[in-house]
Image: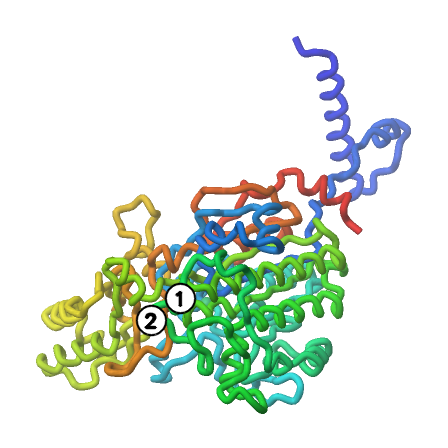
């Protein structure tokens, strides 16, 4: 027996459906009104509204932020980073599934929702077999493309996203919303600002040689010119980076073993921004110090706030896109390592900058009208000398030694010298024709693989055909996670011929033999310390909480796409459905202004 109230409901629903069907038919056939239609039309429900959309999508990338920094330092944060955790969705098991954990790769993955095997940005730079030289991921050989400097600067080079094989989320948003979207991105690095924005943008701005820079496909913006003139980086000349917290709040002692500070600084606080000489005009050492200090993060935050004001981001008819990649944590991490006071302190300062940025967005766009994602492009390995002190098997894998052993092996088998064109990170590129010859000469191929394995710190070597012919399989298959990671990184034509997997805590280092390293530590391999990064979402449509399912930063763009009601062309990531409010269109529509 069906209770009468349900019968009533069903009747209304049926009537509604009939009315809707009639309305649709009527809109096509222009059926004349009759008296019989009157009551039916009167009972028709309101047409379903399209879900509300965020007014502004904000993408924040912290260059080189390990996932465990949030666990370690959260208690010392009081502002923006804390707010992201408290008011947002915190994904505690987010990691890149691929091997090439580098800046250009990570930013492209976040912006497109695809892995490098799809988006093609396989490294910061790779060996171009046709050009027979190293090319950076953003270098554009088109003679009509030029980098443009603000405030009278004359930068070299030409940088665009032409090598990125799929569109970014921001580009898709602009294309699929009839151009109402404005795309703005900032970073100290071209490979971050450009990949976050995509092939075209209203503004994509980075820092080069002491000046803010863009390139011809992006054009220039008057508000950036004004900021570059009124608050240039050199205005921070003479400032000093001092510890923000009481001394006993720091996890680590000073002078990390193996750390290499920028020129003009030593390993102890405080760090003066006075260049090499300490007097006069800012020199290149000053800009290196500035980029390795919290002042650069603050400059990026100010630029982002100026963009919100000047372009009225979040106040147009569409959804706008603002991206900032904070580069300084990366410089500090390379110099001082992850176990340093500098890393801990720069995050305390970044927490304050992000708090300022969110307060600005609350005021200008409206709390709840914008959605934020914060992630990182990769993590970092502790400085090997420091790791060795703990008794762990750690060290430096010298890539020039790998190259030397390959050459010696092939010379003894009558191969012409040089057989190796370049070793860049994990990727070994052979001279033209050599790898094809090796593939047909199993004796020589095995000798080369054995020679590489004798170099201290090498765990395994993979061949291109193992990755290209046996693509990445689901995590529960028999394929090892490292093998799968190299397959997710493999892009035909750009990736190497052989791939070196170091042992855990062994740093891949290309410094010429006999010379000392010009940096403390690095990243770029398929171990969790490089792959595990934070993913935090906050604001429009986001269900706060802690989430423990394994995800990847490639899930950010599909989640943004779901919130904005658009479709990505080539995603590898998935929508983070658990962190989305299921009734977002009902609650958000009341917030529309
Ligand atoms: Zn990076």
Q: Nearer the viewer, residue 113 or 432?
A: 113
Instruction: Measuring from the top left, give residue 363's x and y in whole percent.
Output: 76, 57
Determine which quarter of the picture holds residue 521.
Answer: bottom left
Q: Is residue 159 above or below residue 392?
A: below
Name the secondary structure under disc 1.
Answer: loop
Asked if ligand 1 lies within 8 A of label 1, the reply is no
Instruction: Measuring from the top left, give residue 409's x and y in whole percent.
Output: 12, 77
Determine which quarter of the picture holds residue 183.
Answer: bottom right
Callout 2: few (<14), some (14-19), or many (20+) C-alpha neighbours within 10 Å? some
Callout 1: few (<14), some (14-19), or many (20+) C-alpha neighbours within 10 Å? many
Q: Nearer the viewer, residue 417 or 40?
A: 417
Whether residue 449 is visible, yes or no, is yes
For the point 62% across and 46% down, the residue is 87
Instruction: Measuring from the top left, give residue 397's x and y in whole percent.
Output: 25, 70
Name the secondary structure under disc 2.
Answer: loop
Quarter occupied by the N terminus: top right
Give the mark nearer the N terminus: 2 vs 1.
Answer: 2
Which residue lies under the disc numbered 2?
A: 258
Contact (Cβ within 8 Å) of mark 2 with mark 1: yes
């Amino acid at each position: 027996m069906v209770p009468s109230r349900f019968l009533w409901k069903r009747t209304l629903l049926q009537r509604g459906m009939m009315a809707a069907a009639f309305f649709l038919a009527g809109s096509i056939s222009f059926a004349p009104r009759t008296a019989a239609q009157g009551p039916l039309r009167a009972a028709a429900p309101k047409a379903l509204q399209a879900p509300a959309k965020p007014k502004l999508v904000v993408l924040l990338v912290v260059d080189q932020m390990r996932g465990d920094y949030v666990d370690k330092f959260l208690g010392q944060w009081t502002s923006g980073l804390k707010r992201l955790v408290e008011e947002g969705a915190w994904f505690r098991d987010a990691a890149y599934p691929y091997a090439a954990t580098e800046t250009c790769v990570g930013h492209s993955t976040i912006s497109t929702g695809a892995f490098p095997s799809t988006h093609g940005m396989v490294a910061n730079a790779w060996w171009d077999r046709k050009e027979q030289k190293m090319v950076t991921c953003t270098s554009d050989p088109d003679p009509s493309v030029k980098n443009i400097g603000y405030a009278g600067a004359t930068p070299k080079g030409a940088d665009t996203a032409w090598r990125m094989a799929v569109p970014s989320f921001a580009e898709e948003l602009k294309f699929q919303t009839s151009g109402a979207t404005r795309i703005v991105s900032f970073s100290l690095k071209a490979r971050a600002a450009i990949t976050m924005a995509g092939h075209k943008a209203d503004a994509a701005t980075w820092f080069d040689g002491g000046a803010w820079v863009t390139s011809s496909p992006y054009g220039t913006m008057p508000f950036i010119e004004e900021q570059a003139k009124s608050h240039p980086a050199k205005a921070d000349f003479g400032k000093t980076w001092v510890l923000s917290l009481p001394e006993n709040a720091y996890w680590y002692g000073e002078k990390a073993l193996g750390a290499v500070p920028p020129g003009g600084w030593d390993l102890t606080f405080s760090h003066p921004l006075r260049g090499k000489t300490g007097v006069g005009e800012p020199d290149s050492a000053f800009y290196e110090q500035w980029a390795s200090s919290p002042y650069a993060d603050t400059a990026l935050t100010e630029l982002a706030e100026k963009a919100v004001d000047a372009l009225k981001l979040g106040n147009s008819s569409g959804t706008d896109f603002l991206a900032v990649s904070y580069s300084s944590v990366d410089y500090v991490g390379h110099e001082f390592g992850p176990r340093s006071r500098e890393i801990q302190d720069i995050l305390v300062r970044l927490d304050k900058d992000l708090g300022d940025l969110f307060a600005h967005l609350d005021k200008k766009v409206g709390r709840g009208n914008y959605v934020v994602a914060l992630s990182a492009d990769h993590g970092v390995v502790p400085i090997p000398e420091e790791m060795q002190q703990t008794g762990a098997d750690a060290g430096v894998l010298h890539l020039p030694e790998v190259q030397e052993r390959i050459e010696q092996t092939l010379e003894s088998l009558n191969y012409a010298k040089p057989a190796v064109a370049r070793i860049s990170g994990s990727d070994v590129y052979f001279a033209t024709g050599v790898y094809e010859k090796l593939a047909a000469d199993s004796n020589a191929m095995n000798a080369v693989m054995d020679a590489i394995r004798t170099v201290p710190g090498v765990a395994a070597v993979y061949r291109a055909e193992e990755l290209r012919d046996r693509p990445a399989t689901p995590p529960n298959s028999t394929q090892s996670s490292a093998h799968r990671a190299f397959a997710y990184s493999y892009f035909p034509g750009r990736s190497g011929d052989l791939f070196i997997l170091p042992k855990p805590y062994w740093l891949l280092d290309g410094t010429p033999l006999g010379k000392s390293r010009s940096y403390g530590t690095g990243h770029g391999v398929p171990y969790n310390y490089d792959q595990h990064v934070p993913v935090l979402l906050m604001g429009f449509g986001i269900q706060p909480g802690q989430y423990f399912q394994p995800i990847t930063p490639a899930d950010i763009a599909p989640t943004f796409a779901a919130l904005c009601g658009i479709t990505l062309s080539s995603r590898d990531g998935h929508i983070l459905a658990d962190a989305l409010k299921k009734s977002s269109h009902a609650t958000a529509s009341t917030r529309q202004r």
